[in-house]
Image (cartoon, rainbow, N blue to C red):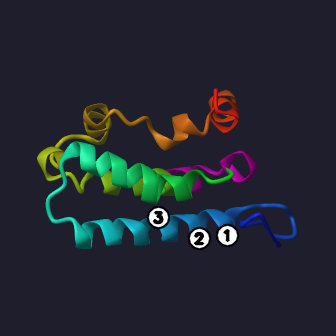
């Protein structure tokens, strides 16, 4: 079943939706990688937030994954994305996030924080 572009199975699980969002996010990462040879940190953050993260967070209060495997798969998208910035490619994932001033996707999906983002406070 598909409602407001969120896919659920007969038991109201959203595993298929998560997998499709991950595939979509990787395809947008590919577009960024092919079209921008050298990305500075500011340009990357702008492209990433508008093209990739927006797909990973659309209606996430409805389909928020609870399975550890799906949570890791979603976070891997951001791990790979941050490696596109060549100046920080060799840093650890946590250090790349600090340099780019990005939180983890798991942190952004926290229930209270998610409600504040959706309401626009």
Question: In this rendering, would 97 be left or right of 117?
Answer: left
Contact between marks 2 and 1 (CB within 8 A): the answer is yes
Q: Residue 103's quadrant in the figure?
A: top left
Q: Residues within 10 Å of mark 2 (few under 14, many from 20)?
A: some
Q: Position of residue 107 (x, y in %)?
A: 53, 34
| Residue designated by label 3 | 25
Depth check, front residue: 34 or 88: 34
Query: What segment carries the magenta color?
Result: 60-72
Q: Is residue 82 above or below residue 34?
A: above
Depth check, front residue: 109 or 45: 45
CA gap, disc 2 to disc 1? 6 Å
Give the overall secondary structure of the magenta segment: helix
| Residue designated by label 1 | 16
How many discs appear?
A: 3
- Give the position of the C terminus as an image quadrant: top right
The label on residue 87 is none
CA gap, disc 1 to disc 3? 14 Å
Q: Position of residue 29 (x, y in %)?
A: 36, 65
Q: Residue at x 60, y 39 (%)?
A: 109
Q: Secondary structure at mark 1?
A: helix
Farthest residue toward the right?
10
| Residue designated by label 2 | 20
Depth check, front residue: 49 or 98: 49
Q: Secondary structure at mark 2?
A: helix
Say if the magenta span includes residue 14. Answer: no
Q: Residues within 10 Å of mark 1 (few under 14, many from 20)?
A: few
Q: Residues within 10 Å of mark 3 (few under 14, many from 20)?
A: many
Compare marks 2 and 3 and give the one earlier in the sequence: 2
Question: In this rendering, would 87 be left or right of 85?
Answer: left
Compare marks 1 and 3 and give the one earlier in the sequence: 1
Q: Is residue 106 above or below residue 55?
A: above
Depth check, front residue: 114 or 63: 114
């Amino acid at each position: 079943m598909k409602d407001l572009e969120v896919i659920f199975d007969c038991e109201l699980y959203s595993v298929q939706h998560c997998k499709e969002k991950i595939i979509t996010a990787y395809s947008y990462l590919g577009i960024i990688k092919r079209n921008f040879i050298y990305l500075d940190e500011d340009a990357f953050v702008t492209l990433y937030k508008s093209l990739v993260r927006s797909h990973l967070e659309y209606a996430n209060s409805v389909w928020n994954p609870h399975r550890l495997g799906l949570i890791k798969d979603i976070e891997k998208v951001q791990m790979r994305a941050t490696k596109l910035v060549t100046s920080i490619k060799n840093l650890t994932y946590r250090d790349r996030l600090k340099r780019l001033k990005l939180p983890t996707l798991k942190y952004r999906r926290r229930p209270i924080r998610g409600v504040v983002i959706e309401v626009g406070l």
